[in-house]
Image (spheres, grey):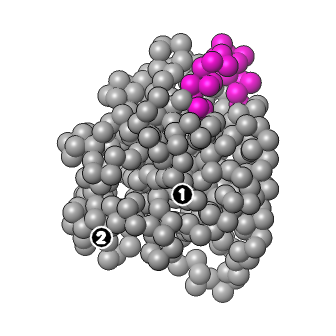
Amino acid sequence: MQVMTVTGPIAAEELGRTLVHEHIVIGLPGEELDPNSRPDRREIVAIAVDKLQELKTHGVGTIVDPCAIEMGRDPELYAEVSERSGVRVVFATGLFFEDSGIPQYWRVRSEEEIAELYLHELENGVGNTGLRPGIIKAATGAQITPLERKVLTAAAMAQREAQCAIITHTEHSRHGEVQQAIFAENGADLTRVMIGHQDEQSSWEEIARLADRGTFVAIDRVGYDILAPDDRRADYVAALVAAGYTRQLCLSQDCICTLKSPRLPFAMPPGVSMTPAEFLSGNRPLSYVVTEFSDKLRERGVTDEDLDVIFDQNPRRLLTGVA
């Protein structure tokens, strides 16, 4: 079984250690209208290459960049970064959630029409680039809207035909069970679905309940102390491993290598204000989850064998459907 990367298909065993949710660059429609917007493509590429090369020195061979279509997705830039860094990149088709995305044209399309877009990109590539996504992104906001339900239905329909993975965004860890239900009702393979951003759950048992329904679950904002403390994340991971959920657990950081915009393209929590430079300077190295955070897990009884399952076997099964 193969998985599609931005530079072409590879065999499952070539993935190696994989981080399932990281970002090379992020943006929002409209930022190009900002009079201060002067993105330097060469600098964006250079920063991302440096970060991915540092990651590669710690044994990571692949990242998944599940950037939604309208959130600054740039397959040609990904390809350049991948080729120069030596780290494989799997990127996404799929629309984001209503408050932050979904262009008007696609808001009025049917589930079938949205699924047709996803399938066209998966099979033929994005635009005239010929670069093909390897996964579908799906997302819901703080409250699931009818439009988001339609887009999730389209993701399930496309996944059913393309037999690829779906990786989701949940706002504040909410509504993963609704995502699962919509996917199941529309014929998606739940064993190829990862419910993302479970870092803010009130307990590890809530995450386990999602895993009980057959999907992967992700604690994939490691390092974002503004959302949840890493010690609690580590406690959750250790508890899930001890309870037998190792084979359904994925870890990543949702780290953003760089931004095109002169201002942050997303809202910060109330009372928090920072520039893009301040935001990015607070990011830990991309390797943090496989170095310092993994050490936190070892202190809590998670073994190297468990970590091999989480970082090697689980992403491979998610992305390819094979062990």
**Residue at 71% from the left image edge and 52% from the top image edge:** 86
Look at the numbered disc 2 and give the secondary structure of its residue.
helix
Q: Is residue 30 among the parts visible in the rendering?
A: yes
Q: Position of residue 302 (x, y in %)?
A: 64, 17
**Residue at 54% from the left image edge and 57% from the top image edge:** 8
- Left/right placement of residue 184 relative to residue 312 reads left
**Residue at 51% from the left image edge and 66% from the top image edge:** 131
> For the residues marked 2 and 1, what is the alpha-carbon distance in whole angstroms?
31 Å
Say the numbered circle drawn on residue 107. Answer: 2
Which of these two is toward me, 238 or 20?
Answer: 20
Query: Residues in magenta?
Result: 293-312
Which quadrant, please, contains the N terminus?
A: top left
Which of these two is toward me, 132 or 58?
Answer: 132
Question: What kind of residue is marked 1?
Answer: Gly
Residue 33, placed above or below residue 49: below
Which of these two is toward me, 281 or 61?
Answer: 61
**Residue at 39% from the left image edge and 40% from the top image edge:** 193
Question: What kind of residue is marked 2?
Answer: Arg
What is the magenta segment's predominant secondary structure? helix
- Left/right placement of residue 300 relative to residue 29 reads right
Q: Is residue 307 magenta?
A: yes
Residue 213, placed above or below residue 184: above
